[in-house]
Image (tube, rainbow, N blue to C red):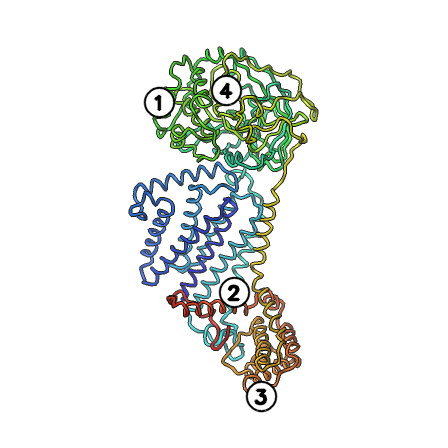
Amino acid sequence: MSGRGRLALCAYAATLMAACSMLPLVDSVSWVVQAAFLLAIQYGVGALGRRVPLPRLLTVAVQMLVTLMLLTVAFAREQALAGFLPGPQTVMLLADLLSEGADDVSRYSIPAPATAGIRLMLVGGVLLVGLAVDVLAVTFRSAAPAGLPLLALYSVAAGLSDGGADWLWFLLAACGYLLLLLAEGRDRLSQWGRVFAGAAGPARGPAGGGLSGGGALAPVRTGRRIGALALGIALVVPAALPALDSGLLSGSGAGNGKGGGGGTISAVNPLVSLQNNLNQPENRQVLSYRTNSNSPQDFYLRILALDQFNGNEWRASTRRLKDVPKRLPSPGGLSPEVAVTEISSNISASSSYRQTYLPLPYPATEVRVGGHWRYESEGRTLVGDGGETTQGAQYQVSSLVVQPTSDQLADAGPAPAALRREYTRVPGSLPKVVKETAEKVTRGAGNAYEQAVKLQDYFAYEGGFTYNTSVNSGTGSAAIGRFLKDKEGFCVHFSFTMAAMARTLGIPARVAIGFTPGTTQSDGSMSVGLRDAHAWPELYFEGVGWTRFEPTPTRGTAPSYTLPDTPSGDPAGPDRPETGASAATPVAPSASESCPAQSRKQGECGSTVAPGAVGPTDSGTPAGTVAGVILLVVLIALLPMLPMLWRIRARARRLSFSAGRTPGDVTARTLAAWREITDTAWDHGIVPDESLTPRKAAERLVRLGRLDSDEAGAGAVHRVAGAVEQVLYAPEPRPGTGLSEDVQAVRAALRASVGGLLRLRAVVAPRSAVRVVWAASDRRAALTARWHLPRRPAWLRRPAWSRRPSGQEG
């Protein structure tokens, strides 16, 4: 293989090793196999272009075109011309997939499902980084800058992951980069031609060409040392710098969080793992609480509200944050004529539940929680500051139970112009069928309240919709139109579609994200699990404020003010519950009579009586996952040890060769001992030279190994060499004695003649382990000859530095 071919192979390996850092982000690893295959084609095109040779820029252009064609075949084959040529429809489809992928990334937690959009982002990202590495390192022969795209690939994974095994992926990516630097160093060195050592320098290269002499390897050693030093600095310097835990680099998404009124809440999508949580086989607890409310079916725990709809997704607006006041302001739009009752609740979060936003009943009036939290007044949410999360949090909340009557909602006046302008905005990409359906469903309604109730009933009861958590979770305009056509989805589709339809009717609307009330425990506390994650629309009515509606069938409960001839729920008294004291046992909403029988059979309704403590009861990571992770770590740890294990096995096999007394057995035993001495010397830096006779080879080994002063070692080498000459050249070979002892003596002498690092390398990374590659090459050659397979082209053959010396056997 030429120098550039070897460099391209190392660039390919480095890209894949850096791409492996993204494996924990997705719950499927099939995407990396696809990326590896497409990347191999991309690199092969680059190698062919350089071999022709094409001009550098033309080679890059051809690779870019082939990359686009590969993505077209992999993700948009049906829209492509002739199945592989990208056209306008192909570009539009790929753009839509990227948009859906960005939406899925913001929605799911790690590990996310490998949706088409996420797969395109992963595979396309690896191909782009691979192209950049190939262009820099191979086409323009500058490997050092190629570390930047590799670093970008690793940084994306490190920034999104939870940091559990970042060191492992960093080590893998760093090894790939060092491999690339080493290959470039060898390539540059080879351009100077053969380098010969002086008379005093021992030969270190393979016989018959390559590098020889210690001076020849000095640039390579220097390159490795520089790379190791650079990586060491990269690891040590960040540890010594002050932490960047605020502003743009903050992971909390809450701005700096310091000072009155400072900081903003990032416009991130909080639909984190909602669909994934709903499909969990085990409903693991995330929250538990006690409340003195007598209407637990209305005790929704709200995280925040999504109030911006841009056509691709619903998002939370960027808002200013301020310090949490002792008493939260009165809810906007709430009139004194509307009956309200204040209740109190004690809430505990599981140690496995990490969320930047604090789940609260709406509207909360007072929150007592430890840690660093900030307040966003428009959505009445608390946001963690400086990395603060809900993990293990215990807090007390006072909140209002708002009890509007149907008459109050029906008589609500128009909302303020600014609020109506912001919360009735819909994108131009919203399908016309959304407004048409809204007008059709609400025909005959006399006011906004009746329109809202008709919309809720249309989705929950009358429209023929089916609750299904396995459908595509898109939330954009196209997904809303598809949902109205297919009439199948889960809470995200129901809430987003109703909010969009309400906006087309001029009713201010947004979508709240949080949890349904959960299930009652035997001690009177309430348990909220992963499957209680939920989304619901909030519509604004002047005099009442933001009001909850429930369009999702079989999930949660419809508010009393939306039911015909149903009085408002009887609020609890204002007494605050004591911490640890049991409140009156409420009825679990998930076991209500409204739950369909089919859902009850499938266990989706929950249980009204279940054992459990008041505090969080996190069952922890499943044993199968733990065992799988341990097995993966063990396999990764064993991978670098394979050369050492092979060498130990080979030594034991050679030294235990004692069966049989025939001439053939004597020859095999003697040659095995000589092979072990040769390989031991090779491991300690003395490359074998098979062009020499055993006697000359023994003299060379004693000289280069500096064994002249070690009579035991030198004598053992010459004795084994003499035994080899006997079995190879004597008319009647005499069996040698004490061969194993002589081999051990030579090994001990060689170890004593070198430094500690070289001794360690001889054990951990023995050079003679390349015989495994030679053996595989021999098997392939035999298979090629047997089945008449075509020979590999010259640029794919093994490089000269890895070929065995003349006469060397596998």
Q: CA distance from mark 4 to mark 3?
A: 104 Å
Q: Say above or below: 594 vs 765.
A: above
Q: Quadrant of the N terminus?
A: bottom left
Q: CA distance from mark 2 to mark 1?
A: 72 Å
Q: Say above or below: 418 vs 647.
A: above
Q: Residue placed at 53% from the left, 39% from the top? A: 250
Name the N-terminal-most of marks 4 and 2.
2
Query: Is residue 98 at all visible to an observer of this figure?
Result: yes
Residue 361, position in %: x, y? 57, 24
Residue that label 4 marks: 547
Judged left or right of residue 283, residue 135 is: left
Residue that label 3 marks: 732
Residue 78, position in %: x, y? 33, 43
Q: CA distance from mark 2 to mark 3?
A: 52 Å
Q: Amino acid at mark 3?
A: Glu
Question: Mark 4: few, some, or many residues within 10 Å (few <14, many ≥20)?
Answer: some
Q: Amino acid at mark 4?
A: Thr
Residue 408, position in %: x, y? 49, 11
Residue that label 2 marks: 222
